[in-house]
């Protein structure tokens, strides 16, 4: 228990459902993981696997009209966020926990100056007002390396490039020194060179403040360069979680294995690429057991029930959700 | 912002000249002989020639054009063929009434329509939304003179809350306000319907945008997200619609002035049409031209205020 | 017709039908409109009395058994005049909107298809027309050409052409770029054939929505001008003219103004509902309401 309260974020059994044509379907189920101080957890998986929904659920930003968290806890520094109402969440968002989104071109309000949008977070969560807030916002913009920040403080988003806008987003997210920041594919929409710059910036800021980070991506190359630990999701399930090198060298879950062998690598021939047969089941037709079973070469009858997420005998830090692999104790020696 | 204002003002001038030119040609290329139409076909050739001379129609086009433009720019709109008083004088008499009516209608339309549209968007598909949409549909189905007559019947004739003839006594501001209420409500309600509809649909679009999600993720209170972040953007199409609607407002104000027996440009227009008062008609068209250009200018300036992408290039 | 155009073209009318069936508002509106059209077309048989027959003794008589809606200032049967007035409204509005659809639609498709200077000049002309609200245009035309029904139709058509041209132009611009048009050209299809067979069906959807809304505008304009005294001239029955008469006698016989008002209201409400409902079904963004 005391260990959990030291963790900036601990997600326990989180399940979020969406309503499709009148019926509720689980989009993510029983997602559990934690993130320590100064740690970067990469959350990976293909499009639609539930990575973004997990982040939105943590933030309490699931659209209420058609979605809701149906089970689980989200412990921010020991405090469960799920039962909180909107007003209480408003004091936490942008304050103790922040989020950066994928599309910098549309994530900033076109009719408000960027300086205003940065200072806004400060005005709602800190005692700073007026000139003091403005000064601090300017400092933040300089910190994320916006050139001529003082001159451009009152400029509008349309006057900035995509890379610059993403830096502004980062400034906004960091304004109140959050304990944890959720980054939902922040570099996917950017040029490769800008990508590298933004990633470097994030790494630098993170190590300065000691904040935790959840980095969502489908790009395993980025994962290799910035993550401490990696969590793999498939069809709404968290199926494997391990320190980054461990995951790349000894992937346990059949899906992770298949994923890693399907990406091109410099040291392998293209002929060795093996695409994964089959398709992800639609949300309205998800099996209640292991969702990868249909495509899995290791499938056994037991896979019709959902396997638990368990640590390996050889390495409790490496957890996998698979009947077959978790039971095989000789693996990973 | 300032360069934008200056640019807009500079554009307005040639636009005004262009529109005035259109007005000039409009009256002169119409089929039929104005003199004949005014005097009837029993008139003698001398009488017809006299009228043509009075109207300046016997001069070459170029001379007429210069005369026309210089008169307009001096503020002289000629003399009414019927009352023989200066056109500008007649217009100046009634202009305040028309302006106060139009402005009141605009204010009512925006002040009621905007929050109603926001509320409808927030409570989409709930009772409030349906009620608001029904109201706006009904509002759009009332021709201005029909709603005017209904209001007149109900509130002036039956209930005696307001005067039947909406002129007001000079020097008595209260009577003027009382005379303004029903006509302003008549015009205003239709505007409310328009503004509410476009605000609602605009808000619905904006609420799904990424930057709203960003604002929420910053912990900005819901109230501020709606009124500053969302409405700030949603207002832009509303400005367009209001700008477009100003033209319709003129037509409706003509009808309103007739129904409520109110002095204003509308009555002047109708009377001059019935009486074939050509000079008055031409003068009124010039006024209309000015109105159009000023309205467009104001709309453009409002855009500049509301949308920084327009004013900060 | 090409299979694609068939799929799309039959689509417009089919979608109209589907829209009306599924969308309660559109169905309701369509019902009201149908009722009005029927009563107008059948007026000669439905009207209990001659709308032009005067009877001095019945001046401004309130509703009675023989004259359910009362009599006007010339003793004429209000019910009959409302039915016949509907014919006038139907005639004026349908004619002007139809002409506007043909002329405006053709101009819009041509402008979008040909592009270049032709497009720019045409659209500039349309912009000029668009800056005139319908009533003002009506007043202007009547001022210059005299108050006849023909001029009334002309005025409404002039203002309606521009919007229809615009909404015909927009899909033309997108469809023009599509591959099957290029393929058609390569196969030697004439421009005309491409425009009629491929582009026109795509334009129909939006035009139908506009048509419903513009019919309402046309009826309103005709009534407004008749109310001012510059539209349909008495003794021909028209709703606007009847309301004018009612207005002049409002203290003595309010029903004279009320009944034609209700008629206009109901019809415009029905048309607006129909137009709104159709627009909701064709706009994918609003489909989930």
Image (cartoon, coloured by chain):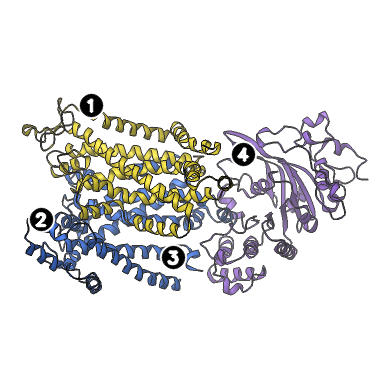
Q: Residues within 10 Å of mark 2 (few under 14, many from 20)?
A: few
Q: Which residue is mark 2?
A: B40
Q: Which residue is mark 3?
A: B305
- Dot 2 lies on which element? loop
Q: CA distance from mark 1 to mark 3?
A: 58 Å
Residue B212: x and y in percent read 55, 54
Looking at the rendered image, the disc whose residue lies closer to the viewer, 2 or 1, is: 2
Cβ–Cβ below 8 Å for labels 2 and 1?
no
- Which quadrant of the rendered structure holds the C terminus of chain A? top right
Looking at the rendered image, the disc whose residue lies closer to the viewer, 1 or 4, is: 1
Question: Chain A is which colour?
Answer: purple
Which chain: yellow? C
Q: CA distance from mark 4 to mark 3?
A: 41 Å
Same subunit under labels 4 and 2? no
Looking at the rendered image, the disc whose residue lies closer to the viewer, 4 or 3, is: 3
Question: Chain B is which colour?
Answer: blue
């Amino acid at each position: 228990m005391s260990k959990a309260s030291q963790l900036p974020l601990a997600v326990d059994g989180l399940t979020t459902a969406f309503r499709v044509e009148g019926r509720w379907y689980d989009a993510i189920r029983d997602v559990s993981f934690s993130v320590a101080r100064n740690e970067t957890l990469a959350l990976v998986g293909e499009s639609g696997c539930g990575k973004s929904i997990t982040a939105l659920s943590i933030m309490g930003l699931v659209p209420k009209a058609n979605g809701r968290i149906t089970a689980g806890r989200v412990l921010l520094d020991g405090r469960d966020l799920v039962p909180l109402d909107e007003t209480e969440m408003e004091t936490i968002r942008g304050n103790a926990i922040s989020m950066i989104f994928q599309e910098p071109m549309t994530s900033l309000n076109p009719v408000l100056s960027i300086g205003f949008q940065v200072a806004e977070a400060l005005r709602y969560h800190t005692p700073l007002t007026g000139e003091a807030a403005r000064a601090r916002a300017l400092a933040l913009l300089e910190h994320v390396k916006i050139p001529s920040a003082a001159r451009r403080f009152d400029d509008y988003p349309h006057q900035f490039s995509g890379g610059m806008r993403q830096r502004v987003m980062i400034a906004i997210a960091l304004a109140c020194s959050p304990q944890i920041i959720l980054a939902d594919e922040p570099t996917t929409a950017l040029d490769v060179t800008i990508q590298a710059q933004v990633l470097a910036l994030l790494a630098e800021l993170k190590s300065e403040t000691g904040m935790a980070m959840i980095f969502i991506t489908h790009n395993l190359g980025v994962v290799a360069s910035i993550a401490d630990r990696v969590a793999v999701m498939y069809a709404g399930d968290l199926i494997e979680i391990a320190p980054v090198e461990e995951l790349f060298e000894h992937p346990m879950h059949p899906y992770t294995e298949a994923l890693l062998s399907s990406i091109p690598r410099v040291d392998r021939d293209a002929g060795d690429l093996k695409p994964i047969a089959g398709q992800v089941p639609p949300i309205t037709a998800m099996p209640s057991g292991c969702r990868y079973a249909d495509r899995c070469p290791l499938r056994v009858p037991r896979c019709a029930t959902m396997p638990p997420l368990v640590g390996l005998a050889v390495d409790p830090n490496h957890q996998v959700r698979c009947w077959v692999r978790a039971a095989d104790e000789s693996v990973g020696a | 912002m300032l360069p934008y204002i200056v640019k807009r003002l500079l554009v307005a001038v040639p636009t005004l000249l262009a529109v005035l030119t259109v007005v000039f040609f409009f009256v002169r290329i119409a089929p039929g002989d104005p003199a004949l139409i005014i005097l009837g076909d029993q008139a003698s050739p001398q009488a017809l020639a006299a009228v043509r001379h009075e109207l300046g129609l016997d001069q070459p086009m170029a001379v007429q054009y210069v005369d026309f433009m210089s008169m307009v720019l001096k503020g002289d709109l000629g003399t009414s063929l019927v009352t023989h008083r200066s056109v500008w004088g007649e217009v100046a008499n009634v202009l305040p009434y028309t302006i106060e009516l139009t402005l009141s209608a605009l204010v009512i339309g925006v002040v009621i329509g905007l929050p109603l549209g926001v509320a409808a968007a927030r409570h989409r598909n709930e009772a409030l939304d349906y009620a608001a949409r029904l109201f706006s549909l009904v509002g759009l189905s009332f021709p201005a003179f029909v709603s005017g007559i209904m209001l007149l019947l109900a509130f002036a004739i039956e209930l005696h809350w307001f005067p039947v003839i909406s002129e007001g006594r000079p020097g008595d501001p209260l009577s003027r306000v009382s005379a303004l209420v029903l006509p302003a409500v008549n015009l205003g309600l239709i505007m409310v319907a328009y503004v509410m509809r476009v605000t609602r649909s605009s808000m619905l679009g904006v609420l799904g945008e990424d930057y709203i999600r960003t604002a929420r993720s910053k912990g900005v209170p819901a109230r501020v997200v709606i009124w500053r972040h969302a409405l700030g953007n949603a207002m832009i199409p509303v400005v367009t619609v209001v700008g477009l609607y100003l033209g319709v407002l003129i037509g409706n104000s003509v009808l309103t002035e007739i129904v409520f027996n109110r002095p204003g440009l509308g009555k002047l227009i109708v009377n001059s049409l019935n009486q074939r008062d050509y000079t008055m008609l031409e003068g009124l068209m010039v006024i209309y031209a000015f109105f159009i250009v000023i309205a467009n200018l104001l709309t453009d300036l409002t855009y500049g205020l509301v949308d920084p992408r327009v004013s900060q290039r | 017709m090409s299979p694609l155009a068939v799929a799309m073209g039959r689509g417009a009318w089919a979608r109209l039908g589907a829209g009306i069936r599924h969308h309660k508002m559109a169905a309701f509106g369509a019902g009201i409109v149908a009722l009005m059209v029927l009563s107008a077309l059948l007026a000669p048989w439905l009207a209990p009395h001659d709308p032009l027959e005067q009877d001095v003794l019945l001046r401004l008589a309130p509703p009675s058994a023989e004259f359910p809606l009362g009599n006007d200032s010339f003793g004429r049967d209000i019910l009959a005049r409302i039915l016949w007035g509907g014919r006038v409204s139907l005639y004026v509005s349908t004619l002007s909107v139809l002409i506007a659809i043909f002329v405006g639609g053709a101009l819009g498709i041509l402008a979008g298809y040909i592009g270049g200077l032709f497009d720019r000049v045409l659209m500039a002309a349309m912009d000029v027309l668009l800056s005139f609200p319908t009533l003002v245009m009506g007043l202007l035309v009547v001022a210059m050409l005299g108050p006849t029904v023909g001029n009334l139709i002309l005025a409404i058509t002039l203002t309606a052409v521009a919007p229809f041209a615009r909404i015909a132009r927009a899909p033309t611009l997108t469809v023009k770029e599509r591959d099957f048009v290029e393929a058609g050209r390569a196969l030697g299809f004439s421009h005309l054939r491409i425009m009629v067979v491929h582009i026109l069906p795509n334009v129909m959807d939006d035009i139908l929505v506009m048509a419903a809304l513009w019919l309402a505008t046309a009826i309103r304009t005709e009534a407004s001008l008749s109310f001012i005294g510059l539209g349909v001239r008495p003794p021909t029955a028209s709703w606007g003219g009847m309301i004018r008469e009612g207005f002049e006698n409002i203290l003595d016989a309010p029903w004279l103004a009320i009944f034609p008002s209700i008629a206009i209201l109901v019809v415009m409400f029905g048309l607006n509902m129909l137009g709104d409902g159709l627009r909701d079904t064709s706009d994918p963004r609003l489909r989930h309401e």
